[in-house]
């Protein structure tokens, strides 16, 4: 939520700064559109860049204890990921290999996303603490049992159930990844909208010029 509020505030400030600069240059440059447009867009992107760097510095100023905790959680998640990768190479079922490969790729993306934005750990932590360790253990037990020379009816049923549950867990991991990326998606949509509006500035400046000409 803090990230979203910061993005809203950043674009609000930069957008208004761009408008003020554009109108000022428009009047000072004898109502010429191109210099006004370029000056306004330059001011908008400049203010946005400065505020973005400042927000990144603020994010880096988190307590050392919190940084250490995030690193430890990611280290544990990555260690489990490596165990899953090793177990995957011992799978004999093509379908299961595809499922585990997909799960591995999705979790890798979640870990990388949290590494880039540690505050997103709060979204991924329930998955890292609950479903993820269970998934790795299930895959390892699945590999062990599937390699046995004989199988009972109960064992075969357990293997089929594991395949189904891991498929469902992969879908859960995909939803978790989308949740972690949701703030980035929203930020991109906001920036695209602001850019679209800024590209429409020539129309407003032309209108101002026409009014001044009257």
Image: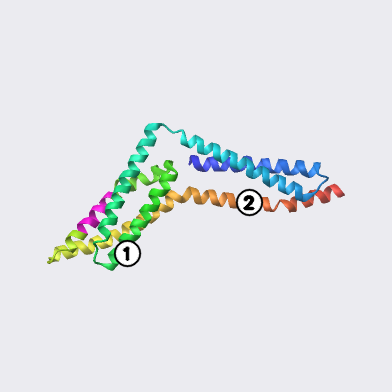
Q: Label 1 vs label 2: CA separation?
A: 40 Å
For marks 1 and 2 on the same chain, the one whose residue lies earlier in the sequence = 1
Q: Secondary structure at mark 1?
A: helix
Coloring scheme used: rainbow
Seen at 67% across and 45% down, the residue is 42
- Considering every residue shown, the one lying at the far right of the view is 214
* Few, some or many residues within 10 Å of mark 1 (<14, 14–19, 20+): some
Q: Which mark is residue 164?
A: none
Residue 12 coordinates in the image, percent (x, y): 62, 42
Seen at 42% across and 41% down, the residue is 118
Seen at 70% across and 43% down, the residue is 19
Is residue 47 at all visible to an observer of this figure? yes
Tell me: residue 103, above or below residue 28: below
Q: Provide the major secondary structure of the magenta segment.
A: helix
Residue 164 coordinates in the image, percent (x, y): 27, 62
* Few, some or many residues within 10 Å of mark 2 (<14, 14–19, 20+): some
Q: Is residue 79 left or right of residue 50?
A: left
Residue 145 coordinates in the image, percent (x, y): 17, 61
- Considering every residue shown, the one lying at the far bottom of the view is 94
Q: Which mark is residue 98?
A: 1
Closer-to-camera residue (179/94): 94
Residue 104, located in which quarter of the rendered image? Answer: bottom left
For mark 2, what is the residue? 195
Q: Is residue 20 left or right of residue 64?
A: right
Residue 166 coordinates in the image, percent (x, y): 29, 59
Report if residue 138 lies within the magenta region.
Answer: yes
Is residue 131 at all visible to an observer of this figure? no
Residue 106, located in which quarter of the rendered image? Answer: bottom left
Report if residue 174 lies within the magenta region.
Answer: no
Which portion, as a residue range, is magenta? 133-142
Nearest-to-viewer mark from 1 and 2: 1
């Amino acid at each position: 939520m803090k990230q979203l509020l910061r993005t809203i505030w950043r674009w609000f400030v930069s957008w208004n700064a761009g408008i003020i600069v554009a109108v000022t240059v428009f009047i000072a440059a004898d109502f010429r559109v191109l210099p006004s447009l370029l000056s306004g867009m330059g001011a908008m992107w400049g203010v946005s860049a400065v505020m973005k760097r400042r927000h990144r510095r603020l994010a880096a100023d988190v307590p050392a204890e919190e940084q250490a905790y995030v690193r430890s959680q990611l280290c544990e998640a990555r260690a489990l990921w490596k165990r899953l990768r090793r177990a995957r190479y011992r799978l004999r079922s093509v379908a299961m290999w595809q499922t585990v490969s997909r799960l591995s790729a999705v979790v890798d993306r979640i870990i990388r996303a949290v590494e880039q934005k540690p505050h997103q750990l709060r979204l991924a932590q329930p998955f890292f603490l609950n479903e993820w360790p269970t998934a790795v253990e299930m895959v390892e037990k699945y590999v062990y049992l599937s390699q046995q020379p004989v199988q009972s009816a109960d064992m075969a049923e357990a293997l089929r159930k594991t395949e189904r549950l891991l498929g469902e867990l992969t879908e859960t991991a995909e939803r978790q990844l989308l949740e972690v990326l949701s703030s980035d998606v929203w930020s991109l949509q906001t920036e695209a909208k602001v850019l679209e509006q800024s590209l429409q500035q020539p129309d407003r400046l032309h209108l101002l010029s026409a009014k001044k000409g009257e």
